[in-house]
Image (spheres, helix red, strand yellow):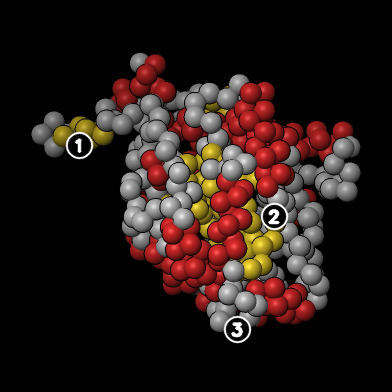
Amino acid sequence: MTLHLAVALDGAGWHPAAWRAEGARPDRLFTLAYWADLAAEAERGLLDFVTFEDALGLQSTRLNEPDERLDQVRGRLDAVLIASAVAPLTSRIGLVPTTGTTHTEPFHVAIGIASLDHISGGRAGWRPQVSGRPDHAAHFGRRVLPPLDFSDRADPAFTRHVADLLGEAADAVEVVRRLWDSWEDDAEIRDVATGRFVDRDKLHYIDFRGAWFSVKGPSITPRPPQGQPLVTSLAHDRQPYEFAARASDVVYVTPRDREDASAIVEQVRAAEAATGRAGPPLKIFADLVVFLETGGAADRKARLDDLDGGEFASDAHIFTGTPEALARLLLSWREAGLDGFRLRPGELPRDLVAITRGLVPELRAAGAFRTAYDTGDLRGRLGLPRPANRYATAS
């Protein structure tokens, strides 16, 4: 069985001192060429897709507020715009930007991701992301959010707040999905002789009314080539697992070892049952931060830790070692029921190149990775069918 492999791109790499490493290119972080080179390298390795991180505030070492650090990368380009700019410069790699759901209107997200799918020829995805930080809310002035106390996740107030954020996100995804369907596939007539460009009967109001949004529709953008671009989400616990089961096609999880991966897969499947998920089961990808080198990966991470003033920690498992050892780990963890992996390069472009030119050949030698792209669209690559249009079926 072919292993699915994605890469999460963020700044100069996931280690906060990566921008200071030899071979880093901090002067190019805010240029198209930087991101195009990374996407091209991922495509050269035949990876399934790349994700682009984003947020509504400057990066911070604190979960709930900004910090005052000036020795780490701060600032980023808009993820959807990066993906759209990179799309014409690539031909096969999937492109999955992140956008917030807490403050961003789903209508804008829907047309942005649909446009990306058209521009890329069916290679778009989306990672919706909630934002509970008060300083993010202050950018918009429409609501006040209380600080989240991550030290007591069993607190009923914390649970209710997270439930509200995820409930809003689920409604946002539902609005986006309905807007993608608001044009039937053959709504565009483009008949010069009759002067009819669209068939008005094949454009549909979505008339969504929920606790968080009221959206009339239809979209201003024709239905995406994939019908429904890939929706992905990052989840660490029961509530986010249930959100993924309701809203996503792919879920990224963060196991610490193979046994933990097996337990998490069971929790995700239980969440699917609890939410009454319809359609294909979630594709489950494990996230790992990777520092890859044939000897010396741990020392390289230690040098970066010294530059940053402390040991790097992550929500995901941190792997330091050779591409061969990582290949063995991935193949072992796959037996827990995982469909694939999303790797977070500790240092860019160094660890991305180690993935495409070191890890991929190892997996290919084990018969676990493709030798060529077999489909052009991202959904098809993951074995997901093109969904029927809900409104066309209803009519």
Q: Residues within 10 Å of mark 2 (few under 14, many from 20)?
A: some
Which amino acid type is shown beneath numbered disc 3? Answer: Glu
Q: Which residue is pictured at 53% across the width and 31% down the height?
A: 281
- The residue wearing badge 1 is 190
Q: Which residue is pictured at 37% across the width and 19% down the height?
A: 393
- Give whichever of discs 2 and 1 has the lower sequence position: 1
Q: Nearer the viewer, mark 1 or mark 3?
A: 3
Which amino acid type is shown beneath numbered disc 2? Answer: Ala
- Give whichever of discs 1 and 3 has the lower sequence position: 3
Q: CA distance from mark 2 to mark 1?
A: 49 Å
Find residue 10 and report its horizontal and vertical position in percent: 59, 63
Q: Label 1: state its secondary structure.
A: strand
Left or right of 87: which side holds 189?
Answer: left
- The residue wearing badge 3 is 22
Q: CA distance from mark 1 to mark 3?
A: 54 Å
Q: Which residue is pictured at 70% across the width and 56% down the height?
A: 317
Looking at this view, is 197 or 261 the one in front? 261
- The residue wearing badge 2 is 316
Q: Which residue is pictured at 74% across the width and 46% down the height?
A: 132
Which amino acid type is shown beneath numbered disc 1? Answer: Arg
